[in-house]
Image (tube, rainbow, N blue to C red):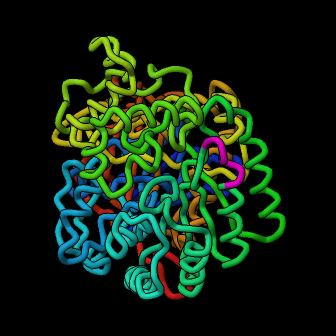
Amino acid sequence: MPHDILIRGGTLYDGSGAAGVPGDLAIEDGRIAAIGDVKGTAKKTIDATGLAVAPGFIDIKTHSDFTLPINPKAESKVRQGVTTEIIGHCGFSVAPALPGKVALLKDYLSPSAPWLPFKELTFPQYLDTFPATAVNAGMLVGHNTLRLMVVGMENRAPTGAELDAMIALLEDGLKAGALGMSSGLFTSPGAYAQPDEMIAFGHILKKYNAGYFTHLRDESNNVLEAVQEAIDVANQCGVHVEIVHFKCSGMDNWGKAATALQMLADAKARGLDVDCDSYPYAAGSNPLKNLLPQWVQAGGVEAMLARLPEKETRARIRADIERDGLNNWGRIPSWDCVQISISPHLPQYAGRTIAALAEAQGIDPIDALCNYLVDDKGATRVLVTSISEDDIAEIVRSPAALVGSDGNCVATYGTVSQGMPHPRFYGTFPRIIDHYVREQQVLPLETAIHKMTGGTARALKLKDRGLLREGFRADVAIFDPKDFRDLATYQDPHQYPTGARTSVIVNGTIVVENAAHTGALPGTVLRRDAAGAVA
């Protein structure tokens, strides 16, 4: 019998970190059937001469839950070689959405998911009804969403009954197969949780052999203390801890990456299961409101919008930022470093900076920022350039650091083509390979691929993905390492990477063939079993 697909003559990078070797790869019934010098014929043969053949890339840190339902072809991700996305990060998940709380959740997530419809939804229903997509998806339960559903936006510890209610919602998701829980301790209401609350959740995650994925409480002036808080969860609860989109933000914190990475290395040497991931760009992305001090955001979006026009509010914001820098971002060189990305109610200003808006209006940047937030109903997303290039290289080469885009799957057409998103949405994985492997020689290709595949699969406990092994799921990326470059820029982000011979296979089905999307939607929802393995 012929194989379903036979990939001939490529250089096989198996995802373990081993150097590439020449060979063939055969696929049958959605799995890898044979590797090496494969005999026989196939229904479909791919000539991979001169190309790298690797496991499909696993994007461990994404927010594609906000776009996959309206962009199931996952164009910007799958064209990078991504075959699996982990969604529900930073404490933000679209489920559970409890009766009477749907509008609250929609309002809360409006800067991140302006086009996504919301409805009452339990986490099991969310997994069961997720639409067919081009990529596999593993889901996390968001701690901010749990707090919003139970405690609201109140700045206090939960009562015993409220903590029990949040734990019940978390367990509901974990029993259904959620991979773990995410936290966003940098912004309300997650920021109101004290360490003992997160330890309580950590013990529940341990009970279900699930993971903890955290956006640190502070990525700027107190980043080292925040890293230690995350390590403490691993130490006290025995769970895997993933520090997502790790960075040391703000000029005062440049150079701290080496110290933080050593903290992670020391923790791993003590037997703790801790990792981090990062994206290879100097700018991050966030709702504009999150750059303001916590007290400004207290009580939710409507309360924030009501206080922003007040002169006293603006004076206090100005003083706080002058003293401490931006909330969670630190001190930036200038307001030219904050660029409008997506603005649902003022789309004509995408690409403009706060400095440019202030200059055009002849007003102070704080006034321009506050006015803009009010006019855009709090829904603005921005790009913030605040990270040192030296720190990026330090993280990219670190054995503790995996690769995650922190981006949504979008496309060059339709609803998700609006605005000017971060170029990482289109370019994270080819940028690692082209810029940091080929140009800068920060690390070898096989190590980079390991950080995108086998290393990530280990962290996520994926039992049959992330490696080229007989019997494993046939998620495969085929590309030319000499012609796999990111083209997306901050000024022109909606651009797919180069690579006319790039092909991507998901669960044994060709989704991208010679850089063209086939329209196939073979992705599956990944679920964690009782032992913690994910399939």
Q: Which of 375 and 340 lies nearest the eye of the viewer?
A: 375
In the image, taking residue 276 as reference, residue 338 lies left or right, namely: left
In the image, taking residue 200 as reference, residue 512 lies left or right, namely: left
Residue 149: image location, x then y, percent: 32, 73
Q: Is residue 515 above or below residue 403?
A: above
- Res. 525 in view: no
Give me the residue at 30% from left, 39% from top.
308
Magenta residue span: 220-225
Give me the residue at 70% from left, 54% from top.
225
Residue 485: image location, x then y, percent: 48, 29
Residue 306, picture quadrant: top left
Residue 4: image location, x then y, percent: 36, 63
The number of numbered discs placed on residues in the rendered structure image is 0
Q: Is residue 355 above or below residue 127?
A: above
Q: Which of 264 and 403 lies nearest the eye of the viewer?
A: 264
In the image, taking residue 53 as reference, residue 392 lies left or right, namely: right
Residue 496, picture quadrant: top left
Residue 101 drawn in magenta:
no
Give me the residue at 24% from left, 51% from top.
302
Q: Is residue 404 above or below residue 106?
A: above
- Res. 118 in view: yes
Give me the residue at 72% from left, 46% from top.
398
Q: Which of 17 and 263 lies nearest the eye of the viewer?
A: 263
Residue 83: image location, x then y, percent: 41, 55
Q: Give the quarter of the figure containing the N terminus.
A: bottom left
Residue 223 drawn in magenta:
yes
Residue 380, picture quadrant: top left
